Image (cartoon, rainbow, N blue to C red):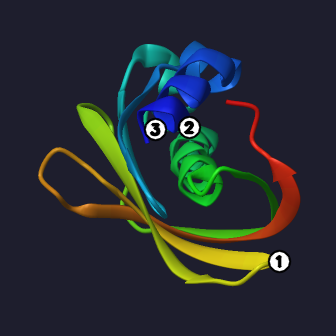
Amino acid sequence: MEKIKQFFTENDKFAEYVGIELLEVSEGKAKAKMEIKEHHLNGVKTVHGAAIFSLADLVFAVASNSHGTVAMGINVSISYLKAVKAGTLFAEAKEVSINPKLATYDIHVTDDGNNLVATFQGMVYRKKEALDI
């Protein structure tokens, strides 16, 4: 799993740009964090939905590609449950189901106090090609 973590840490330039740090990777699972900075805030000084989505989307990508084959998102849904203004956000992805072509994942985004900030559900199409690691 270290190769998967290294692959995404080195190659996901958007996640790096917005300040997302990948913490853990195991088969079908991933965890990351994002320390909230001023550039993550929207016009009313709460964390922008796109920042929360990006954090959830990274762990979705890592968990779904953790089997070593290319997995591409085909459908996602996010629900924002709590506004956050400061601190650190964490996202954790868990595989719900997998077959040779499709897999589904649940992602929870929480704050420093382990309060649920958002829930994200995603489905991937699993290609036959190996991840280039």
Q: Secondary structure at mark 3?
A: loop
Q: Which mark is residue 101?
A: 1
Kindly indicate whether the residue at mark 2 contacts the one at mark 1 (C-beta within 8 angstroms): no
Residue 4 location (% of width, % of height)? 54, 37
**Which residue does the image show at 27% across and 31% down from the upper left?**
86
Which amino acid is tagged 2? Answer: Ala
Dot 1 or dot 2: first in sequence order is 2
Kindly state the secondary structure of the residue where label 2 is placed.
Answer: helix
Q: Are marks 1 and 3 in contact (CB under 8 Å)?
A: no
Q: Point out residue 13 in the picture as x, y percentages from the top left corner.
A: 68, 17
Q: Are marks 3 and 2 in contact (CB under 8 Å)?
A: yes
Quarter that holds the C terminus: top right
Q: Say whether disc 1 or disc 3 marks the residue closer to the N-terminus.
A: 3
Residue under pointer 3: 47
Check disc 3 and give the amino acid type: Val
**Relative image position of residue 130 (x, y in whole percent):** 79, 47
| Residue 118 falls left or right of residue 17 | left
**x 64%, y 52%: residue:** 65
